[in-house]
Amino acid sequence: MSYYVKRIAQTIVVFLSTVTVTFGMYRLMPFGPVEQMKSQLQSEYQKSGQSLSRAQIEQINQQVETLTNIQPDAPLFQQYLSYMEGVLLHADFGTSIVLQEPVFEVLFEAMPWSVFISVYGLALGTTISLLLGAIMAYKEGSSFDTGLTVVSTLTQTVPYYIVAILVLIVFAFQLEWLPTGGKMTPGTAPGLNWPFIAGVVEHAALPVLSSFVAGFGGALAYRGNCVREMGKGYLRLARLRGLSQGRIAIRYVGRNALLPIYTTLMLGVASVFGSSIILEQIFNYRAMGFVTFNALLDRDYPLLMGAFIFFSAITLLGILVADLTYGIIDPRVEGGANRESY
């Protein structure tokens, strides 16, 4: 079995285990979400002071099944099979208790907004930090190198949510250049029209700036890798062959220095949704992180479990892409079954 098939199979097994864990949290935890919902619905029926009839009990079970995708009175193994079938084959994560909408639709509608602010900010910060890291290495010891080393160290030590609060205070409250929260300008019609696009960009500016600053810390790591590569003997051979300095910098130093931090970059892409939970709360940006945090406050268990599966799937996908593409950017790494570290 090839390396790629094994890695994909491992990812599928881990994802199935994640979904199984969510089922276990529903059914195996003492007085878990299913029991809490049943108890809450039963107390509402019993307010009249009468005991529950068989029809009312069945109605309660149907309500719980609709909310959680789990049949409360069925045998445990049958509950598990029904839950896995609903999640894997029909994308049925249940219904949100508060929003009264299917969990998948709620998360799928919110996801593009999180992708927009998180990935765009991280990609922008990473790209610029790599360029500056390479320049710092070539200008090692200069005032430019010293100054950016201090800035990069600061961005690594200051948490991203502190940066978010600072930019909110400066650009939104003090200077009043940008809005304090929201996703778009109120009253604009969603679509390819300038007022809507301008409002979206304007409201995303501060979250993107925060993600940009958070991703800027990689400049220091890339600088160190470049400095190590520049001291190796194969570069001397490349210069003796008459290769241009630009080609040596990009094809040799830049590419080889990127390899040690490539997996970290891919994991950073996978983890942006985790950091978006706090970031979207600070900017009142109603995307996946905002929805997940409110589900936690409201004890909206179906929505919370659905978000858990979404976050896990995205993280696993990021790790899988990093593993499968590492051999492409570094041909020295074999992807076959003869990898010693596998």
Image (tube, grey):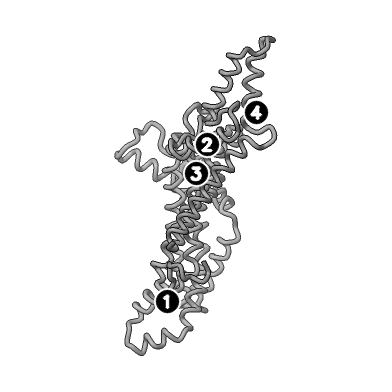
Q: Residue 311: x and y, percent?
A: 51, 46
Residue carrying label 4: 36
The kind of secondary structure element at disc 3 is helix
How far apart are the two marked residues, 3 and 1, measured between alpha carbons? 37 Å
Residue carrying label 3: 310
| Residue appearing at x 44%, y 45% in the figure | 204
Callouts 3 and 1 close, C-beta under 8 Å: no
Q: Is residue 209 above or below residue 289?
A: below
How far apart are the two marked residues, 2 and 1, measured between alpha carbons? 52 Å
Callouts 2 and 4 close, C-beta under 8 Å: no
Residue carrying label 1: 253
Q: Residue 55: x and y, percent?
A: 58, 14
Disc marking residue 187: none
Crowd around label 4: few <14 · some 14–19 · many ≥20 (10 Å): few
Disc marking residue 81: 2
Q: Residue 331: x and y, percent?
A: 39, 72
